[in-house]
Image: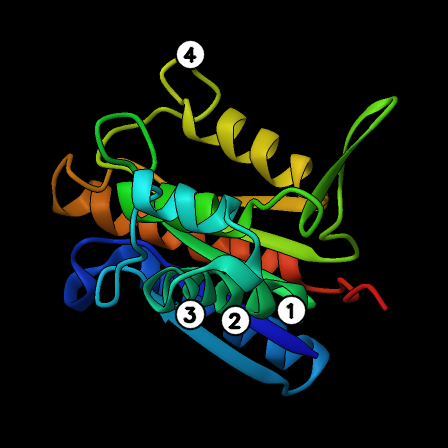
């Protein structure tokens, strides 16, 4: 079993979302057995944005790329290889201004590649990153679950399904900026959700 953990907080040394993502990984391992874990911390090592130079490199045939273009494409190739080989994907996602962190969006842009992780057919797009279990640890200063202000969950459900990952479970830690007791309660509730979600689940073969 290969587990890929993606931490996206801009505060890697004080990140609730990263700690909850690690708790999910630990619970999966305790339930399913030890496996290979790859941790990519986007706060410490940000993914390059999809700018004009990156697009030119991607759309240039491989044999015609400059050394600089080949190096840029290789960065995304490595990220794609990581998620292709993962059986379980765990995302740590704080809420920044009602959205996902920019570094997570850059990672999504890097792994979303036509004819590699998704393809277009006569019936529409088909995701190619299938057979994976995804857990998302969401941390919020306020309480937004199941409200119109929660734009993260619809976005992540849409983009992950587009890439073929439709088996997604969300863990919510909310009210973390609403005082010490609210923070403690929010984190305890998230841990209880982790225990309930992971217990008894089987990783897809």
Of labels 2 and 4, earlier in sequence is: 2
For the residues labelled 4 and 1, the Cα–Cα distance comes to 32 Å
Q: Which residue is mark 3?
A: 22
SS for callout 4: loop
Q: Is residue 44 visible?
A: yes
Q: Residue furthest left?
A: 179
Residue 148, disc: 4
Q: Quadrant of the N terminus?
A: bottom right
Residue 85 shown left or right of residue 142 in the figure: right
Q: Is residue 101 visible?
A: no
In this rendering, the label closer to the viewer, 2 or 1 = 1
Lower position in the chain sequence, tag 1 or tag 3 = 3
In the picture, the disc for residue 86 is 1
Q: Secondary structure at mark 3?
A: helix
Point out which mark residue 120 bears. none
Q: Are marks 4 and 1 in contact (CB under 8 Å)?
A: no
Distance of mark 3 from mark 2, alpha carbons?
Answer: 5 Å
Circles 3 and 2 in contact, beta carbons < 8 Å: yes
Decide which of tag 4 and tag 3 comes sooner along the chain.
3
Q: Where residue 2 sits: x, y (%)?
A: 64, 77
Nearer to us in this view, 134 or 66: 66
Distance Cα–Cα, label 1 vs label 3: 16 Å
Q: Is residue 77 left or right of residue 200?
A: left
Query: Sequence-wise, which precedes: disc 4 or disc 1?
Result: 1
Neighbor class of circle 3 (other Cα within 10 Å; few <14, some 14-19, many 20+) is many
Within 10 Å of the Cα at label 1, are there few (<14), some (14-19), or many (20+) other Cα atoms?
many
Reading the chain from its start, which is encountered first: label 2 or label 1? 2
The residue carrying mark 2 is: 25
Q: Secondary structure at mark 1?
A: loop
Taking the spot 59% from the left edge, 46% from the top edge, the residue there is 113
Task: Give the class, few, some or many, for how many residues have Cα within 10 Å of label 2's Cα (few <14, many ≥20).
Answer: many
């Amino acid at each position: 079993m290969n587990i890929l953990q993606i931490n996206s907080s801009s505060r890697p040394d004080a990140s609730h979302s990263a700690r909850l993502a690690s708790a999910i990984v630990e619970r999966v391992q305790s339930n399913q057995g030890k496996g290979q874990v790859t941790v990519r911390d986007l706060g410490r090592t940000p993914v390059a944005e999809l700018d004009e130079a990156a697009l030119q490199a991607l759309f240039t045939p491989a044999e015609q790329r400059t050394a600089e273009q080949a190096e840029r494409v290789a960065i995304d190739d490595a990220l794609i290889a990581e998620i292709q080989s993962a059986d379980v994907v765990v995302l740590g996602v704080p809420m920044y201004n009602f959205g996902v962190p920019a570094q997570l969006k850059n990672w999504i842009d890097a792994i979303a590649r036509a004819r590699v992780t998704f393809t277009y057919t006569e019936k529409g797009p088909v995701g190619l990153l299938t057979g994976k279990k995804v857990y998302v640890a969401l941390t919020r200063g306020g309480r937004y679950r199941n409200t119109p202000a929660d734009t993260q969950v619809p976005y992540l459900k849409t983009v992950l399904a587009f890439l073929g990952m439709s088996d997604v479970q969300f863990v919510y830690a909310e009210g973390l900026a609403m005082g010490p007791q609210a923070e403690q309660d929010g984190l305890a509730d998230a841990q209880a959700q982790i225990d309930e979600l992971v217990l008894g689940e089987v990783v897809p073969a």
